[in-house]
Amino acid sequence: MATHEIEQLRELHGELEDIIEARLREFDQIWLNADEERLFEELVFCLLTPQSRARACWAAVEKLSSRGELRCPARERVHMELRGVRFSRRKAEYICMARELFTVDGRLSVRAHIDPQNPFQTREWLVGNVKGMGYKEASHFLRNIGLGRDLAILDRHILKSLVRFGVIPYIPKTLGRSMYLKIEAAMLDFARHINIPMSHLDMVLWYMGAGEVFK
């Protein structure tokens, strides 16, 4: 990797650093202050994101929440609100299954399944138990509720940038557990090498692909 490209990356981080820190503080407040419904909204958002635009997914979450469709979700009603989200019928089913999974004695209970001291172990539980949630989605969810700043969210924007900067040689055709963890470790090493926090690097690389700092 050419030195000037690394310097350009550091310069971009400098330009975005305050925006990124503000967004991360917002995420921190979700874990500290949000109720169970708000946590569930973030989980639903991450279930919707595969192969779909983040803003369209969040708009769908806001619509579902405002209309009360996340409290007692019915698959067909949820599906009707997922315009602009790919594989909407399947994802509607995932949302309903997740609501059932996190409902205990008639009450939503997301926090009970999350260990804030061990986001890596929590991620394994999420991947193993939440239908439709892989390592990327679980990492995204934990980051968005203020946990797991060293977890990698390996979407297409991030993977393309990791190839560009020589962190990985190519984008793998599939991202199973071992490959995901291998790339995550390489990204963490890269972050330390260029002295940019992992959670910041994720957002800088995402900005390079999407042109904004969002969720």
Image: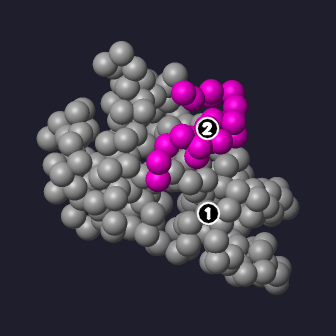
Q: Which residue is denoted by mark 1 in the rendering?
A: 154
Q: What segment is highlighted magenta in the picture? A: 113-132
Does the magenta segment cover residue 119? yes
Query: Considering depth in this image, is 146 or 9 the residue closer to the camera?
Result: 146
Q: Give the quadrant of the N terminus.
A: bottom right
Check disc 2 and give the amino acid type.
Trp
Q: Could you say whether the residue bearing mark 2 is in a helix, strand or loop?
A: helix
- Please give left or right for residue 61 compared with residue 43 in the image: left
View extreme (top): residue = 105
State the residue at coordinates (74%, 64%): 179
* Image: 68 above or below 16: above
* Image: 58 above or below 146: below
Report if residue 52 is visible in the image.
Answer: yes
Query: Considering depth in this image, is 169 or 109 the residue closer to the camera?
Result: 109
Q: Give the percent coordinates (x, y) of residue 69.
A: 20, 40
Indicate which disc, 1 or 2, sits on the residue closer to the N terminus: 2
Q: Which residue is denoted by mark 2 in the rendering?
A: 125
Query: Considering depth in this image, is 168 or 123 the residue closer to the camera?
Result: 123
- Please give left or right for residue 215 compared with residue 189 in the image: left
* Image: 128 above or below 72: below
How far apart in space, not on screen, are marks 1 and 2 (Cα)?
A: 18 Å
Does the magenta segment cover residue 149? no
The coloring applied to the image is: one colour
State the residue at coordinates (77%, 75%): 168
Check disc 1 and give the amino acid type.
Leu
Query: Considering depth in this image, is 88 or 200 the residue closer to the camera?
Result: 88
State the residue at coordinates (38%, 49%): 94
- Please give left or right for residue 87 compared with residue 124 in the image: left
Do the numbered discs 1 and 2 sit on residues whose CB atoms are within 8 Å?
no
Q: Give the quadrant of the C terminus.
A: bottom left
The mark total stands at: 2
